[in-house]
Image (cartoon, rainbow, N blue to C red):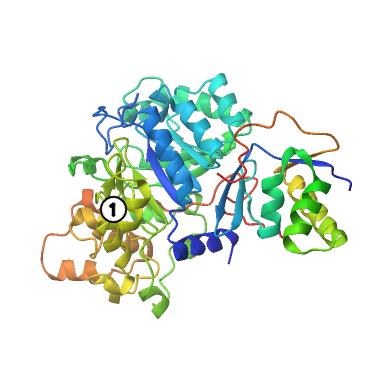
Amino acid sequence: MSLMQELNHKALRLGVPLSVHLDLTYRCNERCEHCYLDHEDFGEMTTAELKSLLKQLASAGVFFLTMSGGEPLVRQDCFELIEYARALGFNVKLKTNAILIGEREAKRLRALGVEQIQISVYSHRPDVHDGITKVQGSLLRTLNAVRLLRAHDLKVTIANVLMKNNFQDGDGVRTLAQELGAHYSLDPTITPMIDGDRSVLRYGIPASELPGLFHNPNLVGDVESFCAPPPPVDDDVREGLPCSAGHTACYISPYGDLYPCVQFPLLCGNVRRQSFLEIWQSSAQLEEVRSIRGKDLSGCSSCTHLGTCTRCPGLAFMEGNMRGPSIADCEKSFARTGIPSKNLQAKRASSMEPASAQDLIQIQGIAIAPVVGTAAHAEASSVRA
Amino acid sequence: MKASYIARSSAVASRILDGEMVIMSAVDSTLFSLNEVATVIWQAADGCTPLSEIVSLRICAEFDASPNEARADAEAFVEELARHGILLVSDCPIVGVSANASENA
């Protein structure tokens, strides 16, 4: 067991929220066509509120802090908040489109010890990338920022969301990442809008293209392993947890709303009305999420894919039942292995209309080996005095 | 002792979990878990307190360790962390260590 796995087990045993994703704002300077957020400010937490929250998170044991948005750098106090978070000892990861990052910002991020910067790049072709962000020249500015960050030895991950308009550009972005000395991660996930509007799903990658994507060694690495049939399901899997959402991780919106995950819009409380720890320890919604085991999942519990499926509880929740399947992930398992899931078979047998192409592609991000890196993200070393 | 003064690097994240310090280097994302004794050394690494004083006043006093054994262990520990760049070592006091080099948050 790696040190990272040990850390996760320990956090789970102790009930510690090891990771928090905090959106500082939903405002953004791009207008990505598939984005699940609106870009208004309905009363974001103030600098003082966010600092108070960060102190609470540190006291609660949060170690990994992802600061995101919207575009976090549109907040005037973004660097002040990063500096405050770093002073509290957080491992900070920043998710940004980077178009506001110049030499001064790159230098400051380095000085602050930000561990990683994740930047969305949709294509290596300016017309495609800018067409998605709706900002002319955005690819050029983003790539300039990546170069500056890399020049300061900051770790950059290029997050490549693949959808209808760019699914053929995965290889190109991966090559670009390699040239820039950045990690590459592929994410074919399109999620419904945070208000439940599913219209953005129309931008998703066509379901018919998924098998090709999952069998591309440039994108997934070892295809044989990635697309292997699932091993037999055992009791450990049946007693296992669906994911870390609500167990060792949670999401907090710019308005203080706390959810199990950014993709799991089950409101558990608001940090403006209750302390973080009070919500974390006593929310009935979190308790319910935590009670779910693999064996409790409708259909999934007896599905051959149970141990390897990337079923997202949040997507299942958005499909109607957090204890049910995420048909989108059923389709993903099918595209990967060629073996239909139990719920997919049932859905087809019931002669109901199969999920639409848009539904089928809202799938969880898949782990792709970094192209370049000096050390694995979760590389573990142990020092004992 | 060879290493006189030690200070926490500003390029790390750290958190106490169940009495043990977890540290991650921002430079290479390597994760470290310190035991109770190492955690005390880490927390005392303020750049001003000599390592010998940390060993005698904190380690030997609090953990019932012999001075020779404690010193050897502490030196090995400091050397290991210094090699990864997460502890700074100097033969004179280290000033101006970044404010974000928190002892545990």
User: Is residue A328 at least partly visible in the picture?
Assistant: no
Pointer 1 local density, CA inside 10 Å: few below 14, some 14–19, many at least 20:
few
Viewer-proximal residue among B101 and A5? B101
Q: Chain of mark 1?
A: A
Residue A25: x and y in percent read 34, 31
Residue at the (38%, 53%) spot, across then down: A212
* Residue tagged 1: A208
Q: Is residue A208 left or right of residue A221?
A: left
Residue B36 rendering spot, x and y as whole percentages: 66, 59
| Label 1 residue SS | helix
Please name whichever residue, A42 or A149, is drawn nearer the observer in this view of the structure.
Answer: A42
Seen from the viewer's position, the closer of residues A79 and A381 is: A79
For the N terminus of chain A, which image quadrant?
Answer: bottom right
Percent position of residue B43, x then y = 66, 47
* Relative side of B35 to A257, left or right: right
Amino acid tagged 1 = Ser
* A45 vs B26: above or below: above
Q: Nearer the viewer, residue A59 or A69?
A: A59
Q: Residue at x 34, y 22 (%)?
A: A135
